[in-house]
Amino acid sequence: MQKLLHRLHPLAGGIAILCIVSFMTASVASELYGDALIIAATKGRILWGLMVLIPCLALTGLSGYRAAGGAPRGLAIVKLKRMRIIGINGICMLVPCAFFLAARAAELRLDGVFYGVQSVELLVGSVNLGLMTLNFRDGLRIVRLRKA
């Protein structure tokens, strides 16, 4: 079971990182190069993408917690603390922003409120992406330390 966790954890984390990068890239590209209908379609597809992202984040968090054991220490504690921030940002900010932006875009109401929320979403998404990247790096360090 432990071996399976060690394989699933980086896979799920990597997929989650790719999801976030693709969501942010699609958002920015649709804003820069698309019209209101393209933006609305992009925001709707991002909502569907949450059906991949959320389970990947949950699997990453749970497998990391299990792999860390009952008394995590060192880099494992740092990673767990980052995951808490990532989770709070996602639940409290990013998911509500995604639903709000998709609904607003579906109504073609691309006004100052839409772009304000979009800015918040991109900022918080960037923070989460940075934290996830640090966790990925630290996970690689943990693996190297185990092999040494």
Image (cartoon, helix red, strand yellow):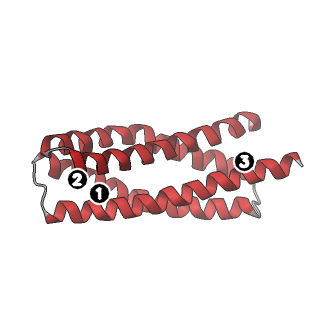
Q: Position of residue 19 (x, y in %)?
A: 44, 42
Is residue 79 toward the left or the right of residue 1 in the image?
Answer: left
Q: Secondary structure at mark 2?
A: helix
User: Is the N terminus in the top left, top right, bottom left or bottom right quadrant?
Assistant: top right
Q: Nearer the viewer, mark 3 or mark 1?
A: 1
Identity, as a three-letter code, of the amino acid under mark 1: Cys
Distance between the Cα atoms at labels 3 and 1? 32 Å
Q: Position of residue 47 (x, y in %)?
A: 30, 43
User: Residue 114 is drawn in which quadrant?
Assistant: bottom left
Contact between marks 2 and 1 (CB within 8 A): the answer is: yes
Distance between the Cα atoms at labels 2 and 3? 36 Å
Identity, as a three-letter code, of the amino acid under mark 3: Ala
Identity, as a three-letter code, of the amino acid under mark 2: Leu
Q: Which residue is mark 3?
A: 67
Distance between the Cα atoms at labels 2 and 1? 6 Å
Within-10-Å neighbours for mark 2: few <14, some 14–19, many 20+: many
Is residue 12 toward the left or the right of residue 36 in the image?
Answer: right
Within-10-Å neighbours for mark 3: few <14, some 14–19, many 20+: some
Within-10-Å neighbours for mark 1: few <14, some 14–19, many 20+: many
Is residue 39 toward the left or the right of residue 135 in the image?
Answer: left
Contact between marks 3 and 1 (CB within 8 A): the answer is: no
Q: Residue at x 12, y 61 (%)?
A: 111
Q: Earlier in the sequence, mark 2 or mark 3?
A: 3
Q: Residue furthest front?
A: 33
Q: Which residue is mark 1?
A: 97
Q: Which residue is mark 2?
A: 101
Q: Secondary structure at mark 1?
A: helix
Q: Secondary structure at mark 3?
A: helix
Is residue 135 toward the left or the right of residue 119 in the image?
Answer: right
